[in-house]
Each structure stands twice: as C-alpha cells, then as structure tokens.
Amino acid sequence: MGTNVAQLGIVDSRAPPSCETDFDYKDFFENGSIALHVVGNDGAIIHANKAELDLLGYDASEYIGRHIGDFYPDAEVIDDILARLNRGEKIDKYPARLCTSDGSIRYVEITSTARIESGKLVGTRCFTIDVTDLHRARAELLSQDDQFHQILDNLPVAVYTTDAAGTITYFNPAAAEFAGRSPEIGKDKWCVTFRLFNPDGTELPYDQCPMAIALKENRPVRNQEALAQRPDGTLFPFLPFPTPIRDESGELIGAVNMLLDLTERAIADEAKQHLSAIVESSYDAIVSKNLEGIINSWNQGAERLFGYTAEEAIGKPVNMLIPEDHQDEEPRILERIRKGERVESYETTRQRKDGSRVPVSLTVSPVRGKGGRIVGASKIARDISGAKESEHRIRMLMREVNHRVKNQYSVILSMIRETNKRSENPGGFEHQIRERIMALSRSHDLLVSGDWKGATIFDLLLAQSKPFGSDDMLSMSGPSITLSPNAVQYLGIAFHELATNSAKYGVLSGHTGKIAVAWDVNKINGQQTIKLTWTETDGPKVQSIANGGFGTVVLKRVAPQALNGTADIEYGDHGVVWTLVAPLAFVEANLNEPV
C-alpha cells in the first residue's frame, strides 16, 4: 500500500502550508537548492523537488511514481539503503550512483531518515548531494599519483625521496640496483647505499652526506662526488643531486635525490630526459642553450628570477637576459664552453623581463651529446641580491661602528681628563674611571641588543640603576620613547652620575625615600620638546654633588649640550631634582632610518 505526503509530515503542493508540518513544503521542499525526494513504504517516489529533477534531468511526470530502484545502477546499494531504513536507521552521506535521463552516471551521497509508525516503515525523506566533480577530482589525483610512481619506477636512473628528517620514504628499482640493496622504508636515513666514502677514500658519515646537507641547510647540493660501496664490497664513484622539496607555503617537507653512476657516464645523456622534475624543484634558475646562444630549456627557478615564462623564453636568444653594457660576456662564455671549459661562480648582472637588474652568480657547464661532442651549455643562475645587500649593510655598519667607536673614545678620554682633574689619589681615580666606563658599557650593551637603533628610557634607567640594587625605590612614568644612540650614551652617563651621587649621599644610601623619574612631551614654541625630571624625596639630608665635580659637569653641561637642550639641578633638604629640557628630535631615535 502506498504512502501519501501527509503521512510523512509533508503538505501536498496544492494545499497551503501548515504549522504542523516538519517544514514549509512550498518554500523549502519545492524551491530548495538541495536535491530532495520522498519515497513511500513500497519504494515508489512520491515527491521530488526541482533540484532533484534538475540533477537527474527528468520531468516530474517521468520521475514521480516510479520505484526508486529504477534509478540506481547498483541494485545492492538501494537494497542496502532500503533495508537500513526499514530497520529505522538513519542514512548519512551514503555513497551511491544515480542514472540520469541521458544515461550518464552521477556520483552522489545520500542522507535519509525513515518515518516509522507502529514498527513499520511509512516512508522516507532523502537528500541527495552531487559529488560527481569531487569523485572525478579524486580519481584524477589517484591517476596522477599512480602515473608519477610509474614514471619514477621505470626511470633508468636511481631516485629516492626522504621526509624532512632524512628518513627514506620511497626508492625506485634503479636505486635498489644502484645500491645493491633494498633500503628499509621508514627506517634507513639519508642514503640508500651500504657505505659512503669521500673521493679521497676517507669514510663519509651518513649525516654528513650531500642529502643530509641539503636537508639541514635547505638547499640543493651539486658537484659533490662521492664513492659508494655495495654489500658485495664493490666500490664505484657517483654524483648525487639532492634537492629540497617544499610545500605550497615554502615549508621544507623532504628531499629528492638522483644518483648518477660515474662509471657509465654514457647514461647521463639519457638520464637528462628525466631530470625535469628534479630541476623544477630547484630554487636556482637552470637554463640550457645551444652553441648559438638560443635557449633550449627553462625551469621555474628561471621564471621566478627573470620573470619570463618558459613559453616566452625557449627559442629566444639568451642575450635578452644580458644588459647592454654586459653583452660582451656571452661570446667569451660560449668560447670557453666550445673548448669544454666550465665557468664557475662567475658574478655578474642580468636583466629581468621588467627591465630591472639583478646580481647573479653564474655557473656554466658544457653539455655533451653522443660521442662526447659539445652541443650546448647548461647555466645555473643564483640570485645574490641578498648577499650583495648584506655586504653593503656590513660595510655601512662598519663605517657606522667606526664613527661610534671614535665617539666612545672621545667620551672616555673626556672622562679620564675630567676625573683626573678632580681625583685625590690614583686609587680613587681608578675606581671612578672603572665605574664610569662600566656605565658607558651598559648603555653600549643596550644599543648592541637593539641593533644600534636605540633603547627606551625605561630600559636605560633600569640598566644604569641595576648595579645599585634598589629597584624598589625607583619609579618611572612617561610615554614610551626610543632614544637615539647618542641620547642613550649621554643620558646613560647622566643617570649613572645621579645614581652614584644618590648612593653616596641620597636616597640610595639608606632605606627610606623614593626616586621618581618622569618625562613627557609638549610643544614649546612650535617645537616638540621632552622634559625629563629625576626627583629624590624623603631621603637623608642632601649633600650636594661636589661643586665643579665631574658629575656636575655631566649633568649641567655635557649631557644637555649633547642633546641641544638645557638642564638644572636643585638641592632640597631631603632630595635632589635634576631637570632636562631638550628638543624631541635630538633625543628620539628615527626607527625608519637604516643603521
């Protein structure tokens, strides 16, 4: 006996929606974007929405009323679905195939619930999700993966891969034949060979082999020959080509290695046909050209470096990469290649597609055809912009360091001169000089840790007060300001002299009182100005800094003048107040300015 839609909680389309239904049939069922159909207890289709009919290409008259099994090419699938629903089970994303009106197959996932009354199935409501495109994509990926392994498995050259830790994840039959053994996947590390030796015969530890270096340093390793030993004791020279593999975000996920047996160099020409995948994973630009200078191959590294696609570059003269004032280089390179010579680590400049220039390091090697005849050249171009920028930065830094060291010398000489004038004996002179140079050193340490860009007032105060061990007696308040290197050095000396005086005569000499350092920035006469105040309160009766002493000179003259400002010292009964006013431009660091 059939089932009507009212029994399933679905209102007939001819009747108005009711609040007693499971959902608004007209709005959701009939016009919904999700394919949905209703099946009675006899398996006949009662209703189907437009999305369902569009999915399978049927009119309602061709679809509704037929048995649901008519549309499933796999009878066991619909039988299983109906059996589960009869048991009251819920079907969730059940994979199936459906036949469309034109005879094609759609891959779908079925989600269905049954309505059971008195222990019997009244009917079901089924949602159909079309996953045909996903199925095809998965099938294509599996096919591509299978083809990839078929290609590698059939290569006449040894190839193996590792994960980022160096553990072997794959090797082809040629690699097992090459090594004379089958490595253990997931156990062996770095190399497939039994033992390794350097060309001079000394043993080469696995964790120092070219593959290990490529993974540890995240770079391809080239031109590092080695000797391998098979389990039967035979030794043979070979050349590895370990190359890091990175994911789409550039993260290292492993490496691929090709091993070339140098005892049979003749196979190199044939193996080159299969190197494209490995070459494409190289970050360096790798280009081959014939003896007329016409580009024959172009990897992704070359595309990244020069901006031309392979389609734009192959068949064009390599001279398009050479700036006008370097055009004389190519004839000289080709002349050496024709002689069979290799051009190594040649630094020069090349030109990108957009006309910009890039410094590169070139390695150019002859390419030999059958019979050993030279037929062209292979060029590896490495972008050395970063290295050049680093060299320039180092030179700039050295000049800056030289300038600042000379300034330090001037400050130290001034310290020595002024301290000597005011020292009563050699011991006192030595002690004061040592303490002042150590204060200067603390300021210097802050600058070094900040790449000589500057340091905050907070950090400078903490560094200069730390030797006196009374952090709990010091409070600081003010906006965050990064001092220029010059301000760090001179304010550092001033803070040291204030703290030293306080330790002898003021707050830091006892256990009472406070030191408050406060600063703010205001506009005075149209100029941003910083005002900084060191205030000691509630300490012992003050004995002022010796008149004309080095500390007075620093606080009243040296530090303010270095910052193009002014300063004042006041002495109260139980505290010292030092106030500095200076243009902010002479105090604050310019963080956008290169060091």
Image (cartoon, rainbow, N blue to C red):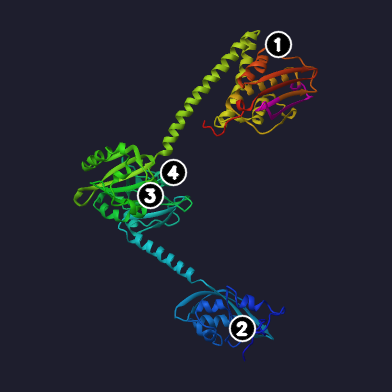
Q: Mark 4 points at which residue?
A: 217
Q: Mark 3 or mark 1: name the one nearer the start of the chain.
A: 3
At 59% from the left edge and 11% from the top edge, which residue is drawn? 417
Disc on res. 574: none
Q: Name the residue under label 1.
A: 547
Q: Mark 4 or mark 2: name the one nearer the start of the chain.
A: 2
Q: Mark 4 or mark 1: name the one nearer the start of the chain.
A: 4
Q: Distance between the residues labelled 4 and 2?
A: 62 Å
Q: Mark 3 points at which residue?
A: 303
Front label number (2 vs 1): 1
Front label number (4 vs 1): 1
Query: x and y percent of residue 263 in the render?
Result: 25, 49
At 61% from the left edge and 86% from the top edge, which residue is drawn? 41
Question: Which quadrant holds the N terminus?
Answer: bottom right
Chief secondary structure of the magenta portion: strand
Q: Which amino acid does label 3 sit on?
A: Glu
Q: Which amino acid does label 2 sit on?
A: Asn
Q: Mark 2 points at which residue?
A: 86
Instruction: For label 2, count other residues whose C-alpha is less than 10 Å away and answer few (under 14), some (14-19) or many (20+).
Output: many
Choose top left, top right, bottom left or bottom right for residue 183. Answer: bottom left
Choose top left, top right, bottom left or bottom right for residue 324. Answer: top left
Foreground pick, 408 / 307? 307
Instruction: For label 4, count other residues whose C-alpha is less than 10 Å away and answer few (under 14), some (14-19) or many (20+).
Output: few
Front label number (4 vs 3): 3
Q: What residue type is labelled 4?
A: Glu
Q: How far apart are marks 3 and 2 (CA)?
A: 62 Å
